[in-house]
Amino acid sequence: MKINELIDSPSELTDTAASKSAVVLMTRIRLARNLAAQPFPGWAREAQKKEIRDQCMQAVAALPQMKRGLAIPVESLDELQKQILVERHLISRELCHAKSGSGIVISKDQSCVVMVNEEDHLRIQVLRAGFQFKKVWNTINALDSDLEEHLDFAFSPNLGYLSACPTNLGTGIRASAMMHLPALVISSQMEKVVRAVNQLGMAVRGLFGEGSDASGSIFQISNQTTLGESEEEIIKHLHGVLNTIIEQELNAREKLIETDPNKLFDKIGRAFGILQNGHLLNSGEAMNLLSLIRLGIDFGVFADTQRAVVDRLFIECQPGHVQHAAKGSFDPNQRDVLRASRLRSEFAKLPPPDFTSAAK
Amino acid sequence: MKINELIDSPSELTDTAASKSAVVLMTRIRLARNLAAQPFPGWAREAQKKEIRDQCMQAVAALPQMKRGLAIPVESLDELQKQILVERHLISRELCHAKSGSGIVISKDQSCVVMVNEEDHLRIQVLRAGFQFKKVWNTINALDSDLEEHLDFAFSPNLGYLSACPTNLGTGIRASAMMHLPALVISSQMEKVVRAVNQLGMAVRGLFGEGSDASGSIFQISNQTTLGESEEEIIKHLHGVLNTIIEQELNAREKLIETDPNKLFDKIGRAFGILQNGHLLNSGEAMNLLSLIRLGIDFGVFADTQRAVVDRLFIECQPGHVQHAAKGSFDPNQRDVLRASRLRSEFAKLPPPDFTSAAK
């Protein structure tokens, strides 16, 4: 598979057939692994890095799960291609800036990715649309075991898997869910939720990880500790916290519709009107409008079949995807025009919102 | 004609058949007149005021122009009825607050109004949709002459017609045009225009006269001097100034579409989307959105037949009209719901904006 072919294929997240849930957009687990007897990427010399990369990429690409996928050195990708992979949550922003000696292997269905020589030698990642930790864990656990048959991972009986940064030591696991929490945002409860989640040892981040903002009311919630618990315990713990957040979000939705339905309908209605008629939309505003449409779908204001469309647009309205679709490089203002044009044509097909069932 | 019948009839401004123009929404002239040998309303005792009112209302109501119109003491009107007459630009806010002894005579087509015992004994007013000073002047001049045959006006050979406030002395005329100037507002030129207009001896006011804001980018421009020039000269002078403002507004529109059409289309498109889908709209926002639709009509984005609809909605989205339509008294939040509901149903019928001809 070539990079352009991959970019033009539906990803796990843009595939309209993928299963979707009301609050959890995506489940993701990544494992940090390093080769024994090799310096970490930050310490390795140019030649060593390339040697590590070749060894890792070869082993990863040979896995049955990666059959007919993409295996490519990062330096072969142009800026737009890298940006598109970031927007699909396949690679990190950090990897984009990596000098030479890094690589990426992506499965054909874009649900499994291995970043080579990012912070660690290997960052194995599996993601799935919806709330599916069991499935994701089984997949990544198998990937990890299969890889371990061909690569010698740095492992200490006391500490577990070794990693470049001590925060990943032990299991090397980071499990996360991308959650859509518009009602908690609208009712100004997010700050309280973040505080509580932090106290439970979990981290809350924006759409594109550390330091990114939460446009579209989308948050990534993940474990912080990787040491002292098994992978299953970490996932179970996170799962419990996520269920509590889901409950709080659903309660906040109930409350919104009970206390001031017109205020909510106004927000959802205006979002639809602007998406259907706007001519300039930056990605932040587009995300926020799409977020309200998704909330409308959950309230039965729009057909359930639209959820997959909105989830796809969450990704396709990002700057890289907008430029790719328009086949060129465009400045932010031109992108706003292109994005609005794209969203207008997507929303022109939709029947108008119907608030009758929501207002029951 | 009864007040409720009048309220339920189309006025000159809400009549969809009335002729409309691109920039001038309405032309209006009023004359201040007082009876000789009677104290001004501010000085008259209760009994005198009633005597003056009876005499004036009788004379006015007997005019052929007022045949089958409405003649009513202000104290017979409830608050909502008065508010509706203000919103139709038929009476002043001041008259609403008048104690006893004031009256109103309105012609059947709601184009001629005489306020009795407002600031002066008689405030004769004629208004017409569009830019029609000649027609309005001919009508009011005839009204004034006819009235003078039955009433003895206070007149000084040196000063002209006497008035309660010296700013109305002489001709007692105030000629004004209600102008829709969205492009001058969008391009931040209105302040400059107001300064220039003031220097030419004209006043610029908001939609509902002195001290009101210019929501909907609607401004009233009128003469300030009433002394030392004939009525015809005053009107001619104002006419010239208005033509200059029209030209500036049209230039500003050209510039908007030339320099950044997408920004303009975005504003017009969003306005349409919000009017079609909003659930909470206060009158200020409604006016501003309707203003953008009217601009869209002028650019050919919407059908020309919609101009009369928008001009009617400018008035029907005011608080009094909203409450009258819903047959009750409602607080501001409820009115915002009712207004949005009304606008949604009006705009649901409209075909979507078509920017192709505007973008030429």
Image (cartoon, coloured by chain):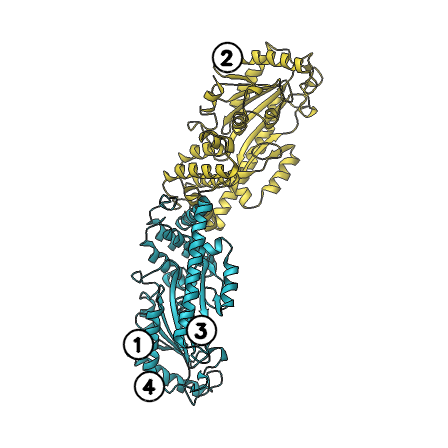
Chain colours: A yellow, B cyan
Report the Cα–Cα distance between label 1 and label 2.
Answer: 93 Å
Q: Secondary structure at mark 1?
A: helix
Picture quadrant of residue B34: bottom left
N-terminal of the two: label 1 or label 3?
A: 1
Tell me the number on the disc at residue A64.
2
Closer to us: B43 or A47: A47
The residue indicated by pointer 4 is B150
- Residue behind mark 1: B66
Q: Is residue A67 above or below residue B355?
A: above
CA gap, disc 4 and disc 3:
27 Å
Is residue B161 in view?
no
* Foreground disc of the pair 2, 3: 3
Subunit ID for the residue under disc 2: A
The three-letter code of the residue at mark 4 reads: His
Q: CA distance from mark 4 to mark 2?
A: 105 Å
Q: Which residue is mark 3?
A: B96
The type of residue carrying mark 3 is Cys
Is mark 4 in CB contact (under 8 Å) with mark 2?
A: no
* Camera-nearest residue between A88 and A218: A88
